[in-house]
Amino acid sequence: MPPWRLLRLSLACLLLASAARAQTRPPSPVASEVEPEEPDFAFIAGSAYLQGKNSVQFIHQTAYGTRRFREPDGSRRNEDEFLFFQRAEYGLTDRWELDLVLPAGGSRARLNGRTVASDYALADGRVGVRYQFRTEGQARFALAMGPQVIFPSGSVRKGTGNGSAGFAWDVGASKDFHGPLFVYLTSNYHATPWAADTTPGSPRRFLLHGADWAVALGVRAIERRIRGHKHDLHLFLEGGGAWEQEVEPGPTVGEQRGKLSWVFSPGIRYGFLTSRRTLLEIGVATPIGLGPNGPKRSMVIQFQYEIYLTPPARD
């Protein structure tokens, strides 16, 4: 079955599931009667807690990783990688969420402290929807999933894009133990059917597959309300992996290869929730790459801003 026909079929199944559940289950509380979910996004793993109706959240993440090598002549070589990640989530209804992801990436190589190569560009973005299949009020855990469309905003020449539209399927599960602990599980399968060959002059196209997965264990270290405002301090222990197919250039045509990477990441984040239901969060994590394909030294700084676009409900 062609990829785009599969995507349309998935959307149709989701719409049918939404209609069936609306007839068999009581309506959930309206978004104007609840405050922003907190926390709902870790550093590596996402959650199954979707945005409430007419609420929007912006997540900005800046990541830096570096590797150091010693050349045969004794010179020092540093290879730095940068990622700027912007995600926007909007609650269409109490069960449907619209997501937009737009990353930018870059790399820099330095020899004995002198920059010898530097490239930065937008990466391939994504737009998609997720549906809330289960909530913790109705089941033992929350479950959300949905399709995504990959648009080729990246640069093939600079290594930040595949030059092809694609599709993905995102799944998230979450469990809040109503105490100090909560758990997130997330996975994403993606494919680009017409990825460009990175060999200059080659017209060949490739079908590339990829998947990533992550788990996060969260700890509520501090949660206090002071003068109508809520202050939170959350600790995270995360682990995840990714398997990606990529095209390596060759003499005349490129070659398709797979790459597996693993990462472990501790992190900490502070959140401030105002009486007007505006949520501000800032956090830092230090991912540690496991194996030859992971970053050896890296840091992630993340900002989150969440607000309801409708005024609070009045009794």
Image (cartoon, rainbow, N blue to C red):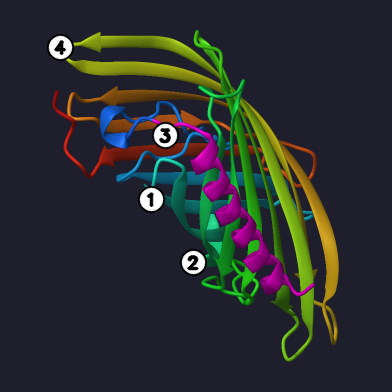
User: Mark 2 or mark 4, which has the lower sequence index?
Assistant: 2
Q: Name the mark on residue 27.
A: 3
Q: Secondary structure at mark 3?
A: loop
Closer mark to the observer between disc 1 and disc 3 = 3
Measuring from the top left, give residue 138's x and y in whole percent: 55, 24
- Which segment did they paint magenta? 1-28
Are there few (<14), some (14-19), or many (20+) residues within 10 Å of tag 1?
some
Kindly check if marks 4 and 1 are in contact, taking CB atoms under 8 A apart as contact: no
Measuring from the top left, give residue 206's x and y in whole percent: 79, 76
The image shows residue 203, relative to residue 242, as above or below, that is below
Of 224 and 266, the residue lying toward us: 224
* Residue at figure coordinates x 26%, y 40% from the top left: 308
Q: Name the mark on residue 92.
A: 1
Question: Between marks 4 and 1, how big is the CA–CA gap?
Answer: 32 Å
User: Mark 4 or mark 3, which has the lower sequence index?
Assistant: 3
Question: Between marks 4 and 3, how big is the CA–CA gap?
Answer: 32 Å
Q: Name the mark on residue 122.
A: 2
Measuring from the top left, give residue 10's x and y in whole percent: 65, 59
Q: Name the mark on residue 227.
A: 4
Closer mark to the observer between disc 4 and disc 3 = 3
Please give left or right for residue 14 compared with residue 198 in the image.
Answer: left
User: Mark 2 or mark 3, which has the lower sequence index?
Assistant: 3
Of 220 and 148, the residue lying toward us: 148
Residue 3, magenta (yes or no): yes
The answer to whether residue 110 of the structure is visible from this angle is no
